[in-house]
Image: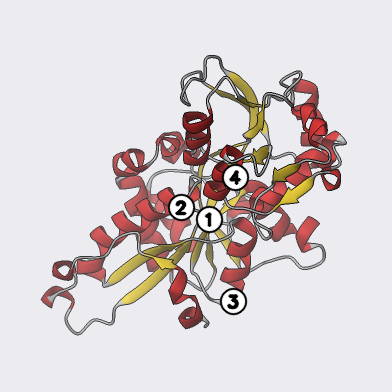
Amino acid sequence: MRRRSFIGKLLLGSLVAAGLVTGAQAGKKEKKYIIATASTGGTYYPVGVGIATIASLKLAKKYGMTFSAVTSAGSGENVDMIDKGEVDFAILQGLFGSMAWQGVGKYEGKPRKNLRSVSMLWQNVEQFVVYNDYAKTGNIMDLKNLYGKPFSIGKRNSGTRVSGETIMKALGIDYNKMKLQYMGYGASARALQDHKVEGMNIPAGVPASAVTQAFANIGADKISILEFSDEDLAKIQKAFPVWNRYIIPKGSYPGLAKDVHTIAQPNLLVVSKDVPEETVYLLTKTMYENLPFLNSVHKATKAMSLQKAIEGLPMPLHPGAAKYYKEQGIKIPDRLIAK
């Protein structure tokens, strides 16, 4: 385990109050679990913090379990950290989860069979934000107008970068002709504001704080979120069938006066197969019994429900999660039962 080298990056979802871990668990060995998220300007981090917070509050005293959330470069680094034993849980893009489990794309010939699903979460909405000088039509193909210009595609080992490159490749947009910058969400928004980049790639639940920051500080009269046509979506689905139509409602961001027709892929919570069944069962149960709390953390979690919990999962469920869903009367297909 390499947790010690990782401690510097830890950001507790909750500094569990001393009163929670008291005499009631005296003699018990405290069990600490880490959830990998992404950069702070997106949706993964606040939701990961929310999950860690409610799980620690509900499980620390009785079960001696505490959870913390950690920032990361996103899906790519999260898969690596689970492999190395640095984290126990992680939030991943559906695209990354599918690639990792099948051993394709970034993981060609090296499937990550140590991963298990816990739950589908919310939709990861593609938000390509550019200055209006380049948004000649408002369509995603306007990214070609950024050839030779600085564009933030996400951190190097992030799902943001991989999904952005996958989308552009499917549409015949040569991202190598851009001056690519590898930044997290908050840094991307600041760079856009300062004209250090002319566009940014922000796949996240709506509203994403980085996009809110950009619209608030730059103005809806100067930047746009590019749209995808049905033809664009069909080309992207042909490459990886994980995306679907998504409409960002007007008013979602400061000054956004009309709906934006974009696309989205699902996000999921995954866990190492080595995490005990009881831990995963209790975390899953706690999440779904406290959805109002998560809804208060980020609006994107309002898409979460037991009815959608196992939709589109790319890998088998951890036995702990499967146990909870069975108790709730959810029928689990054979493909999601871990062998």
Q: Position of residue 179 (x, y in %)?
A: 78, 47
- The amino acid type of the residue labelled 1 equals Ala
- Is mark 2 in CB contact (under 8 Å) with mark 4? no
Mark 1 or 2 closer to N-term?
1
Residue 274 lies, in percent from the top left, at 52, 74
- Is 284 left, or right, of 93 in this rendering? left
Query: What x and y, as percent, mark residue 187?
Result: 55, 50
Residue 38's label in the rendered image is: 1
Cβ–Cβ under 8 Å for marks 2 and 3: no
Residue under label 2, please give it: 45
Distance from disc 1 to disc 3, alpha carbons, whole Å, reads 17 Å
**Which numbered mark, 4 or 1, is in the foreground of this view?**
4
Q: Which of pointers 2 and 4 indicates the residue nearer the eye?
A: 4
Q: Disc 4 vs disc 3: which is toward the camera?
A: 4
Residue depicted at x 76% and y 20%: 136
Which amino acid type is shown beneath numbered disc 2?
Tyr
Q: Residues within 10 Å of mark 3 (few under 14, many from 20)?
A: few
Q: Earlier in the sequence, mark 2 or mark 3?
A: 2
- Image quarter in which the C terminus is found: bottom right
| Mark sitting earlier along the chain (2/4) | 2
Residue 191 marker: 4
Q: Nearer the viewer, mark 2 or mark 3?
A: 2
Q: Earlier in the sequence, mark 4 or mark 3?
A: 3
Q: Along the line of sight, which residue is nearer the eye, 218 or 317?
A: 218
User: Which SS class for mark 3?
Assistant: helix
Residue at x 49%, y 50% (from the top left corner): 44
Label 2 and label 3: CA atoms lie apart by 21 Å
Q: Earlier in the sequence, mark 4 or mark 1?
A: 1
Q: Quick check: marks 1 and 3 in contact, CB under 8 Å?
A: no
Q: Residue at x 40, y 53 (%)?
A: 324
